[in-house]
Image (cartoon, helix red, strand yellow):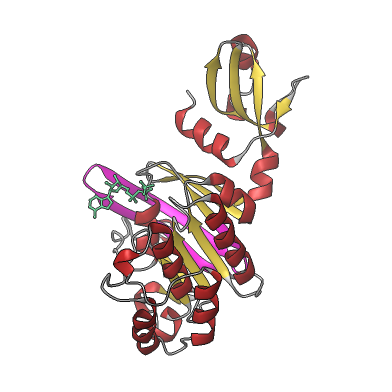
Amino acid sequence: MEYAIDAINITKKYKGFTLNQVSLRLPKGSIMGLIGENGAGKTTLIKLLLGLQHAEKAAGAGKEHASSIRLLNQDINTLPVSVREDIGVVLDDCCFPESLNLLQIEQILKNIYKNWDSASFTHYAEYFNLPEKKLLKDYSKGMKMKLSIVAALSHQAKLLILDEPTSGLDPVVRDEILDVFMDFIQEEDHSILISSHITSDLEKICDYVTFISEGHILLSDVKDDILSGYGLLKCSPQELSLLDPTAIRGYKRTSFGVTALVEREKVQGPFIIDPVNLEDILLYHVRGN
Ligand SMILES: Nc1ncnc2c1ncn2[C@@H]1O[C@H](COP(=O)(O)OP(=O)(O)OP(=O)(O)O)[C@@H](O)[C@H]1O
């Protein structure tokens, strides 16, 4: 399988936080969602992938400690400018000068990107109803986010890396943005990594999902396999204690007994297991006893 992102054993240490030997592989042609609680390490991981932060040197000499980040088949440390242009980035803060308007920003971007596509920029700016003459400082939060997305989509990128591109936006705008991402992914060599707290957005568009918590990857797999492989089991504490412990990923006490996140195939017996969503999976992994 070819990977748009192939990151192995990435470690980053801050005071009080370690992103610990994280690996992440995004198959070419697909969308992966990155889900985790506040402070889980999503932005740190994204910045490492983009080379905006540097990972720690590998701990040992052996192959099992080897660490590398490859984007579009190139090592991040030696990424040619031409490949950098193939990566569209949206970070959670808008990085354009506030004193400029849309047209002035386009002039700057045109000079930066060799593959700049003015027609695409105009198309997406119109699609998102972005005013041409208004200064950026007078844009709403949603407009600024849309502008970042329009820019990322206008230099013929093959890989989009998006840090919370729909956070703080209303459902209508989010839906418009998700449609644009779905459109982008129609090209078979296009791929997207997207982090979000809005798990329903990720549930709509992602092929793969990676859960991260406290600097560790909890789970990374095909979204449909995750959703069909896990379920919520309501039972008594006694029944829970009889289950294979490895089947239980977390549980909460309720007024009726307990509700547990379980791996369906490891549960024997006449239990009814309810379907689960991505939010439940994160909550039970992180907060379930
Ligand atoms: N430059 C930095 N210096 C020190 N600590 C940092 C730095 N950047 C991030 N951290 C710490 O790393 C941890 C992970 O932060 P990160 O921003 O990656 O989380 P996140 O999953 O993106 O969170 P959120 O969902 O709130 O945006 C936090 O404890 C944060 O304080």
Of residues 188 and 174, the one drawn nearer to the viewer in this rendering? 174
- 214 relative to 63, above or below: above
Q: Which residue is painted at 38% across and 44% down in the image?
A: 40
Whether the magenta-drawn stretch holds residue 60 is answered as no
For the N terminus, the image quarter is bottom right
Question: Is residue 249 toward the left or the right of residue 76 in the image?
Answer: right
Question: Is residue 99 toward the left or the right of residue 119 in the image?
Answer: left
What percent of the width, then of the height, locates residue 38?
37, 42
Count of residue discs = 0
Would residue 162 be seen by someone viewing this image from the given angle? yes
- 99 relative to 60, above or below: below
Of residues 57 and 231, the one drawn nearer to the viewer in this rendering? 231
Using the rendered view, name the quadrant where residue 82 is placed: bottom left
What percent of the width, then of the height, locates residue 33?
53, 54
Whether the magenta-drawn stretch holds residue 25 is answered as yes
- 113 relative to 65, above or below: below
What percent of the width, then of the height, locates residue 143?
42, 63
Magenta portion: prevailing SS class: strand
Q: Work out which residue is located at the far right of the displayed protein and give it.
A: 270
Would residue 72 be seen by someone viewing this image from the given angle? no
Q: Which residue is painted at 47% across and 81% down in the image?
A: 155
Q: Which residue is painted at 69% across and 32% down in the image?
A: 264
Q: Which residue is painted at 64% across and 44% down in the image?
A: 226
Question: Is residue 27 toward the left or the right of residue 68 in the image?
Answer: right
Q: Which residues are magenta?
A: 3-32
- 37 relative to 55, above or below: above
What percent of the width, then of the height, locates residue 231?
66, 32
